[in-house]
Image (tube, rainbow, N blue to C red):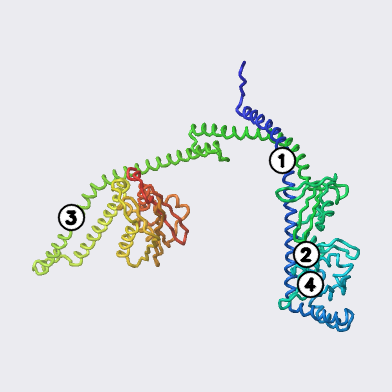
Amino acid sequence: MKKFLFKTLSMKILSFSMVLGLVPLFVVGITLNWLFEISRYDDVKKRLQNHSQEISLEIEGYINSKRNELESMALMPALQSAYEEFSKTFTNGGIYASSYQDVEDRYIDFIGKITERNGFDDIFLVSNNGFVVFSLLYGKYHGKNLLSEPFVSGHMGNLLKTTRYGLQSQVMISDADQTDEHRFIYFSSPVYRDGKYLSTLITRVPLSRIYKTLERSGLLESHSTITMSERRSDSWSSLMLDESGSSMSQDEASGLWLDRSTNFIPDEKTLVVASIIPSINSIMRLEYSESHILAPIFRTRWVVIMFMIAMAMIIALASSNISRSITRPIKQLRRSFKSLADGDKNVLVKASSKDEIGVLLVQFNAMVKKLRSTENKLIETEKLVSIGNLAAGVAHEINNPMAIVTSNVSSLKDYTQELVEHLAQVDKVLIHNELYEKNTSLSLNQNDVSDLASEVELIIDETGQSLTRVKDIVSSMQVFSEVDKEDFQTFVINDLLDEIINEVKESNSSINIEGKFVKSVSVYGRKKQLKMMFSRLIDNAIKASDKKNHIVQIHVGGSAEQAIVCVDDNGCGIDQKDMDKIFDPFFTTREVGQGVGLGLAIAYTIVGSHNGTISVQSVVGKGSRFKVILPQSLTKQAKTA
């Protein structure tokens, strides 16, 4: 059987991508959707149970806070005094006596404020024999005996009896009756004075207020319904039955009940969670709309189907893009290699990713840049070698005749001096000679001899100065051929710069030169060569600085890897057009006779021989900065370079 072969790499990648993408997509999609629905049902159950617990804790906390507020009210001396006066006037004349009205006028504002401040609906002051001696809202209990029928068997009567027997605060929930529009949670607390039981203080809070508090806090949502009932066998049974009449299942871990029901939201199935509120011995039942709670599961099912269809289309497009994305840089790299082989050193490829192909492209770019840098270095090295060879040859050819000329000029100066002195002596002799008096044409004028001597001496001095300048030029050119002849050593560059600064100040005290050293920096290099380099830079800065106010600053800093020295001046700056030529040999912007343009070229050559860099920053009219960066721990490569 003949093996099938793809014609192109892109077709091969596209085919494998489609197979590897579509087959797992349908298998994984169906499986994950099934697992998701199972886990989602469990999550719904846990979320509803957690929600029920949060609401239970919120209600429990609310009830306990109100209970504590009531106990605090029972300790108020003013409220105790109010009870005593209400009780006395109630016993003597009843609630309609004028004395009772006077007491009520004195305390009604105070009692109303503390009741409103603590969030209660009403407050009852109950005597120790069961009479409600004061009620803020004048309800059905006002002036009645809670220990007699029909109240003794009701919530208020039971609450009062429990409080009297236990002598501690109590809480109880009521069911709706004919006279109460709302259901309430009643709170009671015994009132003591001087350690003796005085009366009972009863307050109440509507359940609707608690529900509104839950709504404001965001715990009670619009798609849920809350119902609370006293924990009795009949109410427990009605709450714990689902729609089929079966008892709801209890979750062992949380102690909650969860099932489905249609009891409270007509014509719609609901999920029901029930839990116990211990503080009021009641059951809280929460019903949630099933269509709302489980809507994410139903939506997810359709989303998964649409997702798999969309993913199938995306996989087809992605496979095509992946194929092109893999082959495109390979094709680009192939073209770049061909251009590089043809001699184009500026070819670079764009690396848009960080994967293996992206790394390959980055390495290709690095190779091209390194190749270009190596080529530039070779050109620069060849240039320096040529300059060095030229400098050595020129220096050798010029030094020999220069030595002869210098020697001859020196001898000529000596001979001329002797001639001038001899003529002067002859002139003195002729002045006293008779022949001189008779034959004046043979006499010499003393002024002519002096002028001749001065003229000859000036010519010889100018010739000597010119020869000295030629000698300096030759010495400077010899530096190019001798940069690698000195041995390396470790020294503190700060000390070297201090030495140069002191020499400059000794030669010209009017120059303001300052060293600003951040820290002491050691380098491994050729000390004499580096001294020459920094001397050239500093001399260049001095000559470029303001003639009226020389300011030259030298900064030293660096890190563990490199030393940095900056030489700043306040001179006229360098034109932008001259920046690229500033380090070229024999380039100068000064007038003829003030320099030949070798100082910065020598500095550049010395820094390069130390594997360092030198750069210049300049602003016309403000000054320049020459920045030298030297490796702080020069490798042996510098020594053998």
Please tell me which residue lies in front, 305 or 506: 305
Q: Kindly identify the amino acid type of the residue bearing the numbered disc 3.
A: Ser
Does the residue at mark 4 contact the one at mark 2 (Cβ under 8 Å)?
A: no
Dot placed on the residue nearer the N-terminal end, 2 or 1: 1
Mark closer to the observer (2, 3): 2
Dot placed on the residue nearer the N-terminal end, 4 or 2: 2
Kindly identify which numbered label has been placed on residue 171.
2
Q: CA distance from mark 4 to mark 3?
A: 134 Å
Mark closer to the observer (4, 3): 4
Kindly identify which numbered label has been placed on residue 201.
4
Dot placed on the residue nearer the N-terminal end, 3 or 1: 1
Kindly identify which numbered label has been placed on residue 135.
none
SS class, disc 2: strand
Kindly identify which numbered label has been placed on residue 411.
3
Q: Where does label 1 land, which residue?
A: 36
Dot placed on the residue nearer the N-terminal end, 4 or 3: 4
